[in-house]
Image (cartoon, rainbow, N blue to C red):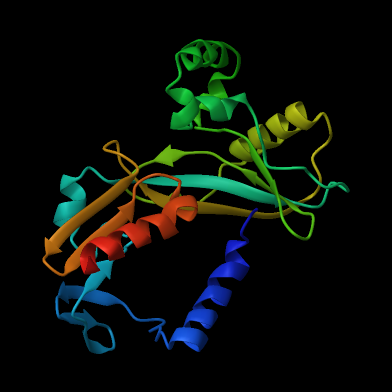
Amino acid sequence: MRVESREAIPALTAWLAREYGVRFLWETAVRKVDTPTLHTSHGPVSAETVVVCPGDDLETLYPERIKAAGINRCTLQMMRLSSPGYVLPGTVMSDLSLVRYEGFASLPAAALLRERLQAEQAEYLQHGIHLLIAQSADGSLVVGDSHHYGPAPVIFGDERVSELLLEEYEAVTGQRAPRIRERWTGTYSVADRGPTFIEAPARQTRLVMVTSGIGASTGFAIGEQVIAELFD
């Protein structure tokens, strides 16, 4: 089962507002947290309990804690291809993925695979490329991705990275890649310390960040864990 984020997120917020009366303050920046007061761009907001989820904003709230944790930023490139004319039975990935995902990369055999990939596809490893192909409800294909690290997001996509992704797509599927419909770059927080970063700046305040590329997959579980700990 896959979730289309561009449709699911607005649908989820609308459902929360309708069914549970959740109030969302859109286009509002939080400048400082001093629980039970949030200082925002539209004035103060009272909150007995605060959970700060800054995503990859490393500078606005608690920058000293984020810096001390060694949290950096990862920028990736992705694209959407037109429908290939058939339905994929699942998500497709290549052997490049097996040396990136910890569940595979920690296995002893992955070391030998990495040696071979370094000899045969060094440029892919240089750009942190591993192939993922996921089909959307309309038949189009989301294809990614690359990984570049640094404090600032990379605004301009590298066309060579796109070429490498398409070459890997054709090598894995044995077919010419369909027409490109969309290209984009994305960013997320990353750290060597582990996939999540959770701290308590104050008794009823939590700073929560996913410091790896698994936020969409694990966000609900992390949220449940944090709320359970705050409210016992």
* Residue 155 at least partly seen: no
Q: Is residue 178 visible?
A: yes
Q: Position of residue 151 (x, y in %)?
A: 32, 47
Q: Position of residue 74 (x, y in %)?
A: 41, 45
* Residue at the spot 23% in from the left edge and 89% down from the top edge: 43
Eyeballing the image, is 114 above or below 30?
above
Q: Choose top left, top right, bottom left or bottom right for residue 27.
A: bottom left
Q: Position of residue 80 (x, y in %)?
A: 69, 52
Tell whether 160 sits left or right of 125: right
Total labels: the figure holds: 0
Q: Residue at x 81, y 45 (%)?
A: 178
Q: Is residue 214 left or right of residue 68?
A: right
Task: Judge left or right: residue 90 versus residue 189.
Answer: right
Left or right, 35 with respect to 77, comes to: left
Instruction: Look at 45% across and 19% down and name the residue there.
Output: 107
Q: Position of residue 59 (x, y in %)?
A: 24, 60
Q: Is residue 59 above or below residue 40?
A: above
Work out which quarter of the rendered image holds the C terminus and state it.
Answer: bottom left
Residue farthest toward the right in the current orientation of the protein: 85
Q: Is residue 115 above or below residue 53?
A: above
Query: What residue lies at 75% left-to-right and 26% top-to-bottom?
Result: 171
Q: Which image quarter: residue 175?
A: top right
Which residue is more in the foreground, 20 or 148? 20
Q: Quadrant of residue 123?
A: top right
